[in-house]
Amino acid sequence: MEQFSSNTRFILSCNYSSKIIDPIQSRCAVFRFNRLEEERVKEYITRIAKNEGFKISEEAIDAVLRVSDGDLRRVTNVLQTVSMQTEKVEEEDIYGAAASLRPEEIREILDKALEGEFIDSRELLADIMIDRGLDGQDVINAIHREVMDLDISDRGKLQVIENLGEFEFRISEGGTSDIQIEALLAKIADMDE
């Protein structure tokens, strides 16, 4: 980087600057950007659909907003993947391409776990994970997005979030995703709610 700094510039774009090693960070100017407002992201999605010649339903736009969480790179990647498969993009196409669970699916899984029906919850999640090729991190992210909408006490939400952190850490440390997700569901099923 130092040798060619007079005629070369590098732009590193990332969601977490802490994941770039210190020797590289020390040679960079860091610019932080906030998430875009939903209206701006919707305008971007509409512009891409128009320019690329595909149609996208309102439900699909909402799904893109949910899975991208304000990240335009993710929006672009998901739309590119889906538009290669179909000219009329629907909600199910987005969740399939993004390898993400629908909100109603994750709520059904969590409701079963909260009712103490661990086996049913586990089987439902396993079927979806196998069908869509999801990994543990996808499931953790989907649960995290839905926790605040659960019909449980704030204390129960706190316990679920605490468990999410624990099992996400275990997965990041090399724990088997399937076992960790099943253990998470078991803990949720065993909560005092």
Image: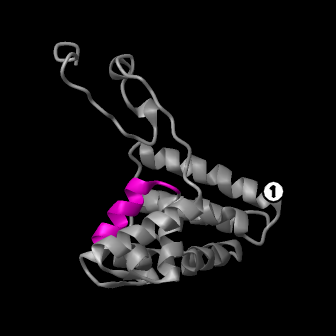
Q: Quadrant of residue 98?
A: bottom left
What's the coloring here? one colour
**In terms of depth relative to the viewer, which is nearer, 82 or 100?**
82
**In terms of depth relative to the viewer, which is nearer, 129 or 176?**
129
Q: Quadrant of residue 177?
A: bottom left
Residue 107 visible (yes or no)? yes
Q: Is 10 on the left-hand or right-hand side of 48?
A: left
Residue 25, compared with residue 2, is above or below; it is below
Q: Residue at x 29, y 68 (%)?
A: 80
Q: Residue at x 43, y 45 (%)?
A: 172
| Magenta part, dominant SS | helix
Quadrant in which the N terminus appears: top left
**In terms of depth relative to the viewer, which is nearer, 124 or 63?**
63
**In terms of depth relative to the viewer, which is nearer, 72 or 22?**
72
Reply yes or no: does residue 72 show up in magenta: yes
Residue closest to the far top: 3
Residue 108, compared with residue 98, is above or below; it is below
Q: Quadrant of residue 56?
A: bottom left
Highlighted range, magenta: 70-81
Reply yes or no: does residue 16 show up in magenta: no
- x and y, in percent, of residue 114 in the image: 69, 72
Q: Residue at x 43, y 74 (%)?
A: 95
Residue 66, compared with residue 74, is above or below; it is below
Q: Residue at x 38, y 45 (%)?
A: 174
The amino acid beneath tag 1 is: Arg
Residue 181 visible (yes or no)? no
Quadrant in which the C terminus appears: bottom right
Q: Is 129 on the left-hand or right-hand side of 152?
A: left
- x and y, in percent, of residue 158 in the image: 74, 53
Which residue is the site of mark 1? 155
- x and y, in percent, of residue 40 in the image: 54, 60
